[in-house]
Amino acid sequence: MLYELRIYHSSPDKLYELHARFQNHTLKFWERYGIQQVGFWTQAIGDNNMDLYYIIAWESLAERERKWDAFMADADWLALKAETEKDGPLYSSITNMILKPTAYSALK
């Protein structure tokens, strides 16, 4: 199993809209494509409370490529993304990494 950690660095005053898009729309698209989220987080204590963190579980890089590419090319998703960003982007950048569990990790 591989885990993808994505950190969305929200645009100023856009974190609420970013949460709303994930909660009300994005997760439905992920269900359509079989994308399995592990969880979503924000910082309770730390240096930046305007970031959204989430992890997706993948069986392999091939699975990730197939499912993520299909999701990102979905015409309905692209229309929704454009609509929700008509007043500007919801994030300034994304940090993305693929994590491989160690032999002693509770998550395998």
Image (spheres, rainbow, N blue to C red):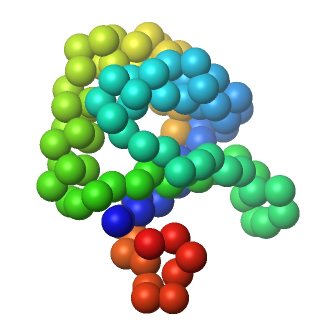
Q: Position of residue 17 (x, y in %)?
A: 63, 24
Q: Residue at x 29, y 30 (%)?
A: 33
Residue 15: horizontal and vertical position, in percent?
Answer: 67, 35
> For the point 64% across and 31% down, which residue is it?
19
Please say if 47 is above or below 37.
below
Q: Quadrant of the N terminus?
A: bottom left
52 vs 18: above or below: below
> Outermost residue, right direction?
45
The front one of 87 and 102 is 102
Q: Picture quarter containing residue 70?
A: top left
Q: Residue at x 47, y 59 (%)?
A: 5
| Side of 102 relative to 19 (left or right) | left
38 with respect to 45 (left or right):
left
Using residue 92 as the reference point, say whether residue 1 is left or right of it: left
Where is 30 relative to 35, above or below?
A: above
- Is residue 16 among the parts visible in the rendering? yes
